[in-house]
Amino acid sequence: MKRIPAIKSVMTAFPYSIDIDAPIEEAIEFMRRESIRHLPVTENGDLKGLVTDRDIKLVLGPDFAYPEPEELSVRDVLTTDTYVVDLSTPLDVVLEHMATHRLGSALVTRKGRLAGVFTTADACRAFADRLADERRSSDNDAA
């Protein structure tokens, strides 16, 4: 049986982040440009939380009409109650917690500093890779 990998082997390393005092419009544009939905928030290099496209939509409304986006900073929208794990945390522990609590992401740290982000897209990619490996292995067994 294969060993369960640590989260560091499947996370997105060196993720983008945004400063807590950045205008929310900057976060919106950045997330659109990079095609991401989860953006870690830092202040002076320290991890402070996470802002998601959903958080932004909930604050601004479905048509981004209220309040005016230029009046808000990331600080006004971020979530501070985020799921944070260490690089060495086993993947199954992270997946179980995310599924149980219906979370879309986990922030990954090394010695308390942001090292990566793990999202449901990363989980799907890792699972697809694992299934492809199993298919290749079974194809080789048949030969």
Image: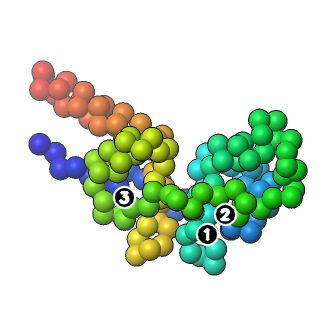
Q: CA distance from mark 2 to mark 3?
A: 21 Å
In screen coordinates, is 44 left or right of 131? Answer: right
Q: Is residue 87 above or below residue 32?
A: below
* Amino acid type at image mark 3: Lys
Dividing the picture into quadrants, the one containing residue 98 is top left
Circles 1, 2 touching at the beta carbon (< 8 Å):
yes
Query: Between disc 1 and disc 2, whose residue precedes?
Result: 2
Badge 1: few (under 14), some or many (20 or more) residues near its Cα, within 10 Å?
many
Residue holding disc 1: 42
* Amino acid type at image mark 2: Ile
Q: Position of residue 59 (x, y in %)?
A: 74, 47
* Amino acid type at image mark 1: Thr
Q: Is residue 105 visible?
A: yes
Q: Secondary structure at mark 1?
A: strand
Q: What label does residue 8 carry, if any?
A: 3
Query: Between disc 2 and disc 3, whose residue precedes?
Result: 3
Q: Position of residue 47 (x, y in %)?
A: 55, 69
Identify the residue at image location x=24%, y=27%.
Answer: 135
In screen coordinates, is 89 left or right of 52? Answer: left
Badge 2: few (under 14), some or many (20 or more) residues near its Cα, within 10 Å?
many
Q: CA distance from mark 1 to mark 3?
A: 20 Å
Q: Nearer the viewer, residue 53 or 62?
A: 62
Residue holding disc 2: 18
Q: Quadrant of the C terminus?
A: top left
